[in-house]
Image: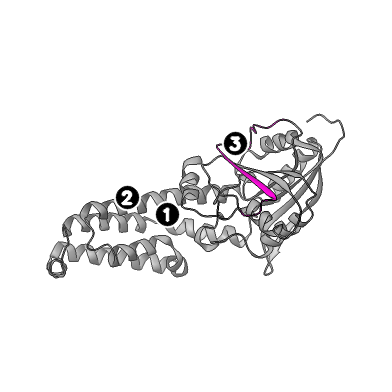
Amino acid sequence: MTQHWSDYWKQGYVTSFGSELQQNYQGELKVIWETFATKLPANFNLLDLCTGNASLPLLIQDCLSQHDTNGQIIAVDQAQVNLDPNRHTNSNIDIKLISGVNCEVLPFESETFDFCISQFGIEYSSILLTLSEIARVLKIKGQCLFVLHHIDSRILKANQKIYQFITQPYVQSLLGNMSKLIVAMGEVQTHDDVIKIKQNKECEALRHQINKDIKSLVQTDESTAKESELMMYVGQFFTQGMFWPVSRKNEFIDFIEQEISSSKQRLCELINAAVDNQKLNSILCEASKLNLVVLRSDMVVEGGEPIAYILSLQKDNTDKKP
């Protein structure tokens, strides 16, 4: 599951919500981490799992920018991720970002960290293996704070709509007809070429079919169509791209197809990762076996709707066997 996430983070997104949240998480999710940050002790040593491009470390850093608290955050992800040096400005908080780290097999010594955190991350893994590793690398009395996708959250519902939208057969029909149109048009260099294209029966037939595909997509889900990157790309092709060379047009269609393929994989994983009551109970049961005592387990609610589960654990010093 790594490459499509690497491709996603390479685009510079800070959160898993893409262009919807350009700077960082907002609302109740931001409040959770700001509250957490203000309670961190001096010289803390914190592990952030499935960090992406370090959204949580950056939130914590921003929150502590006016505080004297110092500490170290080791942020890891299995994908290739990057920390924007322009965002890492608080010299008191040392953020180290490491790519290629599977949270099910952590490359750290036992009892290394005071805290372990993650948001919309560990539920993608084999969570029982991940919890075992977390219990191993946490110090005695070390604490975890996890925010997990809720099966009934508006986040999940919105992404389910996007997934359903981009998996429609009209999408492949649209892109296929755009590729055929590129061939039929040939090189377009002047406005006279555009006039000739409009007089070409094959081009006109393809244009009508493309309009039909777009109309079918919009009728299926108008709001998602308006917000989708697919329709943005199509608009870009017919406004900015008409005078591009044929080779560049074909590369752009390939780019769109790759973006859709990656989105399908990411969204499918998100949907499958979401936590319901049964999965949450399984997590809590396994945590207990690993001497991880539950401090908090409830829903994060915003606007009267659930947006996530929040789970806080503490490593007990009781000598139990998993």
Q: Amino acid at mark 3?
A: Asn
Residue 51 position in % (x across, y down): 61, 47
Name the secondary structure under disc 1. Answer: loop
Tell me the residue that label 2 is attached to. 254
Kindly identify the amino acid type of the residue bearing the numbered disc 1. Thr
Residue 1 appears in the rendering: no
Q: Quadrant of residue 115?
A: top right
Percent coordinates x, y for residue 221 in the rendering: 45, 66
Callout 3 touching callout 1 (CB < 8 Å): no
Residue visible at 67% across and 61% down in the picture: 30
282 lies left or right of 197: right
Residue 262: percent from left, percent from top: 44, 48
Residue at numbered disc 1? 167
Question: Which comes sooner in the sequence, label 3 or label 1?
Answer: 3
Mark 1–mark 2 contact, CB under 8 Å?
Answer: no
Specify whether 8 is left or right of 169.
Answer: right
What residue is pinned by disc 3? Answer: 102
Q: Callout 2: few (<14), some (14-19), or many (20+) C-alpha neighbours within 10 Å?
A: some
Q: Is residue 268 magenta?
A: no
